[in-house]
Image (cartoon, rainbow, N blue to C red):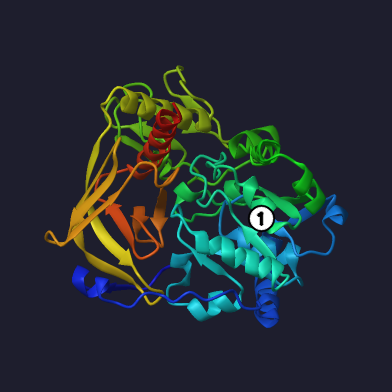
Amino acid sequence: MKIKVLNKTYDEVMGLPRVLHKYPGRPSFLLHTAMRAGSTVDLKAVGFTYESIGLKRAGKGPWFVLMNHCSFLDFEILSRILYPKPYHIVATSDGFVGKEWLMRSLGCIPTQKFVRDAILIKDMNYALNTRHETVVLYPEASYSFDGTTTPLPERLSRLFKTLKVPVVMITTYGSFTRDPLYNNLQKRKVKVSAKVECLFTPEEIADSAVEDMDARLKDAFSLDYFRWQKENEVRINEPFRADSLNRVLYRCPACYAEGETDGKGDTITCHHCGKTYTMDEFGTISSSDGVTEFPHIPDWYAWERECVKKDIQDGRYALDLDVDICMMVDFKAIYRVGTGTLHHDINGFVLEGCDGRLHYERGPLESYSVYSDFFWYELGDVVCIGDRDKLFYCFPRQKDVVAKVRLATEEIYKIKQGSRRL
């Protein structure tokens, strides 16, 4: 999938009118029908099936649906499960670029990832309790890098008490394994299924403490798709299964060099020390020298997180990245405005560029994570920061760094939050 990109100066982009807020309108039944029909081929190809658990407790709706986020197939799965209910999907605002009418007609509600958005809560409440239509939210906000759950917003269950409607969870199995984000849109032959379950009725929401609901929600989102693949003996025999896995496994556990790993075919190689690892058909890593530090990919990624955390605690963490900069201020295009540097440390982000015209700062407590992505709209790996007025898409020229930026942002937030509570 691609996105419209135009070249403009920073000053020209800052002078453009911003998008006016619109409340969600009724989703087009005709378009939802077309989407359901169009998704038939993909869902048939993956042998899609789903089971429902306790949905009678949820009634006829509207529902507040939470779904784990793995790949574009998620949207097609929704069309199978929820049709013919009218439903809205909370979608990233860049998805509206060049197709605002279509997205709004499908019932999509725009929001910026990892940007405080009080208007979004009003939009969801309006759709649920004024229009009486279902709303779908991907609370993880971003696709998983390593097949495990990405952090959830704090105290998400407070929102349940505001909305006062049944909460339904859709969990997919196989979607990540079929199309992991790191693999450059190369799809594998994997069967996909889903479980649809009522988590909370309005009565349970009213009677339950936020902490108790958050604990149950955390348990519902506790997923590890590489473990699921191995336990269910899901075989991936495509020869490209480790292609670009270096985006996730960017640090060598043998020599600790960063940005030197390379995933190609079924092999990961460190070009600094020469060590190689093979990814078997069930997603397990093994080393050529018989010493495998992390056979389980999420354990390797978790170790990278601990390395970043220690660097932050020891005062050693700081990144200065040369970046190409794009901006989003409306739904007409993404605007390429020039180059600059993105600095990240314990105090947050500082972006400077466009011949000195651009200076933007984001503090470490403004969000618990950051919007970072691989092969974003086929343009490249990206880190996105900004606010409701403007978003900056920063494409690092340095290899395999956006996963580290995400990990560091999350760990810095935890450290700062902990200090503030003392």
- The residue lying furthest to the front in this view is 422
Q: Is residue 47 above or below residue 152?
A: below
In the picture, residue 136 is in which quadrant? bottom right
Q: Can residue 174 be spotted in the picture?
A: no
Spot occupied by residue 218 in the image (x, y as percentages of width and height): 64, 38
Q: Position of residue 86 (x, y in %)?
A: 72, 72
Circle 1 SS class: helix
Which residue lies under the disc numbered 1? 162
Q: Which image quarter: residue 237?
A: top right
Residue 293 left/right relative to 156? left
Please name the residue shown 75% across and 69% down the image: 83
From the top left corner, tell me how far across and down residue 207 is, in percent.
78, 43
Residue 139 visible at all: yes
Q: How many marks?
A: 1
How far across and down, in percent of the image, does residue 403 sit? 39, 41
> 69 or 278, which is in the foreground?
69
Give the residue displayed 42% in from the left and 39% down from the top.
Answer: 248
Q: Nearer the viewer, residue 20 or 371?
A: 20
Q: Amino acid at mark 1?
A: Thr
Image height check: is 228 above or below 15? above
